[in-house]
Amino acid sequence: MTSSPDDSLLARLAGGGGEGADPWSELAATEPDHDSPAEAQVKDKKLDSLLDRINRLGSGETGDEPQPQQSPGETDVDDTNGFFPEEPASFRQAQLTDSEVEALVLKFLLARGDAVGREIADQIKLPFVLIDELCAR
């Protein structure tokens, strides 16, 4: 039976082989390749600026960004994030097909068991009118 290199390493680790250098040194981890201090500072500055921006957005501060103009049909709603998507009037406007919506409804019902139409509409974030039309078919 031939001995493999793994067998001799195991024997050396167990103290059975007296060859050469310390067998544990072969298993030692290599030093990690860290970024240079200059590269680390650049990455830290980028990370700090991103975190500052996230904090500003989370606190509702907008900074020097221009405020969007309000369309005549929109109502003025006081909310911290200020974004309200337009409610789609059809699946096509929502860029969805009937089968995609049906799949979402069925997946929700599979997990939930049963639900009324308004709960389904709230879960899949579509107007109840569209869900009602789909269920009536």
Image (spheres, rainbow, N blue to C red):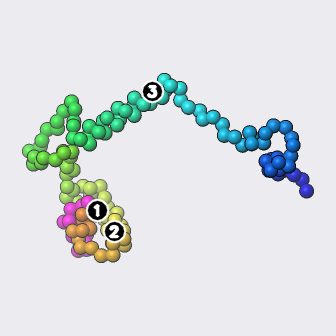
Look at the image and tell me whether residue 8 can be seen. Answer: no
Q: Is residue 50 above or below residue 5?
A: above
Q: CA distance from mark 2 to mark 1?
A: 8 Å
- The residue that appears at 20% across and 65% down in the rendered structure is 128
Q: Are marks 2 and 1 in contact (CB under 8 Å)?
A: yes
Residue 91: x %, y % from top left: 26, 60
Q: Earlier in the sequence, mark 2 or mark 1?
A: 2
Badge 2 local density, few (<14 within 10 Å), some, or many (20+)?
some
Q: Is residue 93 above or below residue 49?
A: below
In which quadrant of the rendered image does the N terminus lie? bottom right
- The residue that appears at 87% across and 43% down in the rendered structure is 18
Q: Are marks 1 and 3 in contact (CB under 8 Å)?
A: no
Look at the image and tell me whether residue 52 can be seen. Answer: yes
The range drawn in magenta is 124-137
Q: CA distance from mark 1 to mark 3?
A: 44 Å
| Closer to viewer: mark 1 or mark 3 | 3
Which mark identifies residue 124? 1
